[in-house]
Image (cartoon, rainbow, N blue to C red):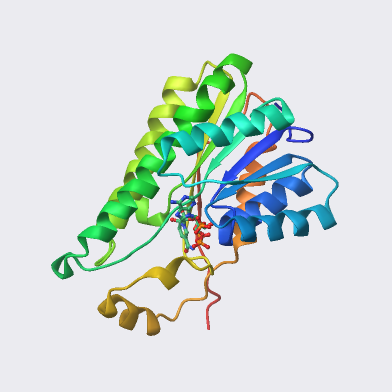
Amino acid sequence: MTGVKNKTAIVTGASSGIGEAIAMHLAEAGANIVLAARRKERLEEIALKIQQKHSVHIKAVETDVTNREKVEQLVAEAKDAFGSVDVFVNNAGVMLLSFLKNDHVDEWEKMVDVNIKGVLFGVHAALPTMLEQESGHIINVSSVAGHEVFPSSSVYSATKYAVRALSMGMEKELSKTGVRVTNISPGAVSTELTEHITDEEVIENFKNRKMTPLEPGDIARAVTYAVSQPDYVNVNEVIVRPSQAKK
Ligand SMILES: NC(=O)c1ccc[n+]([C@@H]2O[C@H](COP(=O)([O-])OP(=O)(O)OC[C@H]3O[C@@H](n4cnc5c(N)ncnc54)[C@H](OP(=O)(O)O)[C@@H]3O)[C@@H](O)[C@H]2O)c1
C-alpha cells in the first residue's frame, strides 16, 4: 500500500484536536475518511469542512470506543461504504491527570476504558479485515507520557505505556502479514484534552506551564508521513515534541 489515495482510513477521536487534523491531512492525501467519536454533530461539521476542501468520500459514525459492538459496527459500516479498511487510527483518548492521593478512581477507570480497551477494540475490529486483505496500517496514538512518568500522570502514563507495549507487540506479530503498525507519541499539543481535568492541584500547576504546545497538524503530518511510505517501509515509532527557540 503506497500512499492512501482512494484507500479507506478510519480515525477515532475525530471530533476534535489531533483526530480532526489527522482526518483532514489523510483526506488531503486522497483517502476516503470515516470519522468516529461520540459527538455526532461535531463529526458532521468536520465532515462538511473536509468535503469543502477535498473531493474524497467521508462518513461520520457515532462511536463510543469503550463499547466493543459499536467499534465492530464502525468497521463494518466503513467496509460496506468503501469496500476496504486500509488505515485505522486509534486516536481517541482522555487525559484525566490527577495525583494518586486525591483518589480520582472513576477517572482512572475511564482512562483504562478509553485509552486501553478502546485501542484493543479497534485492533479487534479492524485487524481481521486487514489480515484478509494482506495489507493495512494501524496507527496507535500513545504519548510522550508513554515514555516517561511525571507527578499526576501515573495512571494516564500507565495507559499510554500500555498503548506503546501493544504497538511493539503488534509490530512484531504482524511484521510478515502486510499489516504495518505505527506508534505515535506526541508531546504537548494545543487541543481540548486538558479541559477535562478535574484535579484542582493539577489545574493550578497547568496555569504556571510556560511551554508553547504544538498544533494538531504537526502530529497529523507525522501520520501522513508514516502511511505514505512504500509498502516495505514500516515506520514503527514517531515521537514529536515541541521545540523551544533559545531566548
Ligand atoms: N494534546 C496533547 O497534548 C496530547 C499529547 C500526547 C498524546 N495525546 C493523545 O492524542 C489523542 C487525541 O487527543 P487530543 O489532544 O486531540 O484531545 P481532544 O481534542 O480532547 O480529542 C479527544 C478525542 O477523543 C474522543 N473520545 C474521548 N472519549 C471517547 C470515547 N469513549 N469514544 C470515542 N471517542 C472518544 C473525543 O471525542 P468525543 O468526546 O466526541 O467522543 C475527541 O474526539 C489522545 O489519545 C491523547 O491521549 C494528546
Task: Say left or right for 148 vs 3.
Answer: left
Residue at horizontal 43%, vertical 49%? 142
Residue at horizontal 34%, vertical 79%? 203
Task: Say left or right for 186 vs 109.
Answer: right
**Number of numbered tags placed on the structure image:** 0
Residue at horizontal 68%, vertical 28%? 80
* Location of residue 111 with respect to 10 vertically, above or below: below
* Location of residue 128 with respect to 35 vertically, above or below: above
Q: Can residue 175 be seen at all in this image of the molecule?
A: yes
Q: Can residue 149 be seen at all in this image of the molecule?
A: no
Foreground of the two, 206 or 90: 90
Residue at horizontal 80%, vertical 53%? 51
* Location of residue 133 with respect to 25 vertically, above or below: above
x and y percentages locating residue 188 in the rendered image: 47, 65
x and y percentages locating residue 110 in the rendered image: 32, 54
Query: Which residue ends up furthest to the left in the rendered image?
Result: 101
Foreground of the two, 195 or 237: 195
Rendered-image quadrant of the N terminus: top right
x and y percentages locating residue 207 in the rendered image: 39, 84
Foreground of the two, 46 or 130: 46
Foreground of the two, 37 or 16: 37
x and y percentages locating residue 104 in the rendered image: 22, 64
